[in-house]
Amino acid sequence: MSPANKIPDKQPLDWQSKSRLTLLADQAKDPRLKAFYQTAHIPGNTPLKQVEFLALDLETTGLHPEKDAIISVGFVPLFYDRILCNGARHWVVQPEQVRSDIQTTIHGITHTQMGTSPNFSTILAPLLQAMTGRVTLAHYSRLERGFLDKAVQDLTGDTLKFPVVDTMELESRKHPVFRPNFIQRWMGDKNSPSLRLAHARERYNLPPYHPHHALTDALATAELFLAQAADQFTPDTPVADLWI
């Protein structure tokens, strides 16, 4: 395929365009990715009450997909008004190299657990199956998108692109000034709200959870979304108004 026909990595995708998804399917070499893109997509005008979501969270060895790795994946399916806990899954994933410098105190996953866990290639098929027909939900989706895309590229040579409803982005719409600038800090302005998952949940009177467990954080994100949906949207809001 000529470079002119390739989708630029930095260009936002039009998730309502079947031609874009067809192009991704044509580009994919791995049958798992090809099947994922060929599956009927969710039209952007679908109301929230008809959309099934998948709250997804990753634990990683750091913040940089180019040099860090996924070590845990958790997800839970949901609709705009209920969470389907019986569909939840959690995996500890073996990174390509279990380095001695990987910190375990934050996420609590030991080097022994990592060393005896399946690698990412083992969970790719069930993960894609769970994502198929659903809109992914994440808090600060840049991490999930970046790490999953890099892991898929390393494994298959393909890219993984998908629409996301980002609960951090939704919260930023309600609180556009979320980080004090220099003048605000100098003047002592402490009223700018944090968009961290735990702090966002506090504003909706949701209970605190111990962080940095992929499944717990996926559930926490799902609960936050239900609160945001009830507060900011209606059941008939088109999903395209939310996804990025």
Image (cartoon, grey):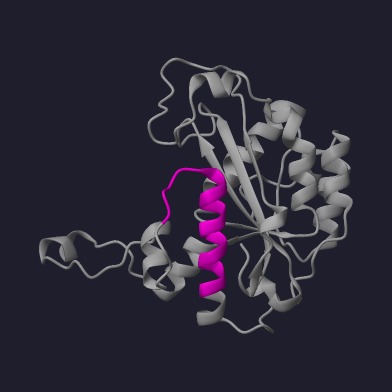
Residue at 77% from the left image edge and 39% from the top image edge: 3
Horizontal side of 36 relative to 127 (left or right) equals right
| Residue depicted at 72% across the width and 54% down the height | 87
Q: Closer to the camera, 194 or 18?
A: 194
Which residue, as the protein is rendered here, is positioned at the far front? 86
In the rendered image, the vertical position of residue 95 relative to residue 84, given as above or below: above
Can residue 105 be seen here? The reply is yes
Placement of the N terminus among the 4 image quadrants:
top right
Q: Residue at x 19, y 59 (%)?
A: 182
Q: Position of residue 236 (x, y in %)?
A: 69, 84
Expressed as whole percent of the image width and height from the top left, the position of residue 105 reads 38, 31
Residue 231 vertical placement versus 182 (above, below): below
Instruction: Indicate the quadrant containing the C terminus: top left, top right, bottom left or bottom right.
Output: bottom right
What x and y, as percent, mark residue 7? Answer: 73, 47
Which residue is more in the foreground, 150 or 114? Answer: 114
Chain part drawn in magenta: 209-227
Task: Tell me where residue 229 sits by quadrant.
Answer: bottom right
User: Which residue is found at the position 74% from the left and 28% from the top?
Assistant: 121
Q: Main secondary structure of the magenta part?
A: helix
Image spot of residue 114 (x, y percent): 56, 23
